[in-house]
């Protein structure tokens, strides 16, 4: 039976894995048992997707990223080169957690910059943008622009990825409004 996705010959896909149509898995990747990957995804060189990880449609994972059990990635997320996920808050080699992992959720359309770290147990909001090298240590709001160590909010971004000015109107035509401390798309 022909597959409707591509896996490079140097990569390993374990049994009991679901991979959506049009997905491409490039050199030296490992997709572990129980992983569910959506349609039209792309995994660069040396990506590891751990057991039971769920990844949505249209996700782009660049080189050298490990997505550990406990992490869920929604549709159209971008994971930059060498971005880091964790799944245990207090790891110890001599006290393994045996499958008890903190949940991390990356919501639809979020972008994680190169070499950023998302500490487990947090949610990165819809269309948020995490700067390269930032360390996320708390939940991130929808459309938030985060930078630094630890990451702090330095502004807002549009769904298209452009930074929003004081008017909260983007050159792409989208407009936003603040509701309390949150930003929402205004139609």
Image (cartoon, rainbow, N blue to C red):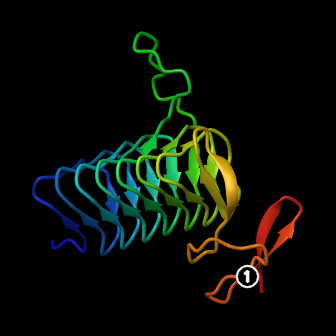
**What is the x, y in percent for residue 141?**
71, 56
Q: Residue furthest left?
A: 9
Q: Residue at x 45, y 69 (%)?
A: 57
- Image quadrant holding the N terminus, namely bottom left
Percent position of residue 173, x then y: 67, 89
State the image quarter where residue 5 is shown. bottom left
User: Is 117 displayed left or right of 18 in the figure?
Assistant: right
Quadrant where the C terminus sits is bottom right
Of 134 and 53, which appears nearest the observer? 134
Secondary structure type for disc 1: loop
Can residue 140 be seen?
no
- Is 42 rendered above or below residue 93? below
Q: Quadrant of residue 183?
A: bottom right
Q: Mark 1 Cα within 10 Å, few/some/many (few <14, many 20+)?
A: some
Q: Is residue 124 visible?
A: yes
Q: Is residue 168 above or below residue 24?
A: below
Nearest to the observer: residue 127 or residue 34: 127
Instruction: Tell me where residue 70 appears, x and y as whole percent.
Output: 51, 41
Residue pictured at 72% horizontal, 73% vertical: 165
Question: Outermost residue, bottom direction?
Answer: 173
The number of callouts visible is 1
Q: Residue furthest front?
A: 166
Q: Is residue 54 above or below residue 100?
A: below
| Residue, disc 1 | 169
Indicate the position of residue 40 as horizontal and vertical percent values.
36, 73
Q: Residue at x 49, y 69 (%)?
A: 76
Q: Residue furthest right?
A: 180
């Amino acid at each position: 039976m022909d597959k409707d996705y591509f896996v490079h010959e140097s990569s390993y896909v374990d049994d009991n894995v679901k991979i959506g149509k049009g997905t491409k898995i490039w050199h030296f990747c490992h997709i572990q048992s129980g992983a569910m990957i959506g349609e039209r995804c792309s995994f660069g060189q040396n990506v590891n997707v751990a057991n039971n990880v769920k990844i949505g449609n249209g996700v782009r994972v660049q080189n050298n990223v490990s997505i550990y059990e406990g992490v869920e990635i929604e549709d159209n997320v971008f994971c930059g080169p060498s971005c880091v996920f964790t799944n245990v808050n207090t790891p110890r080699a001599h006290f393994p957690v045996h499958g008890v992992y903190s949940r991390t959720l990356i919501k639809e359309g979020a972008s994680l910059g190169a070499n950023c770290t998302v500490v487990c147990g947090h949610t990165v909001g819809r269309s948020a943008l995490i700067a390269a090298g930032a360390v996320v240590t708390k939940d991130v709001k929808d459309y938030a622009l985060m930078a630094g160590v630890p990451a702090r909010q330095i502004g807002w971004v549009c769904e298209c990825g452009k930074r929003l000015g004081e008017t909260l109107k983007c050159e792409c035509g989208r407009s936003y409004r603040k509701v309390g401390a949150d930003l929402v798309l205004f139609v």
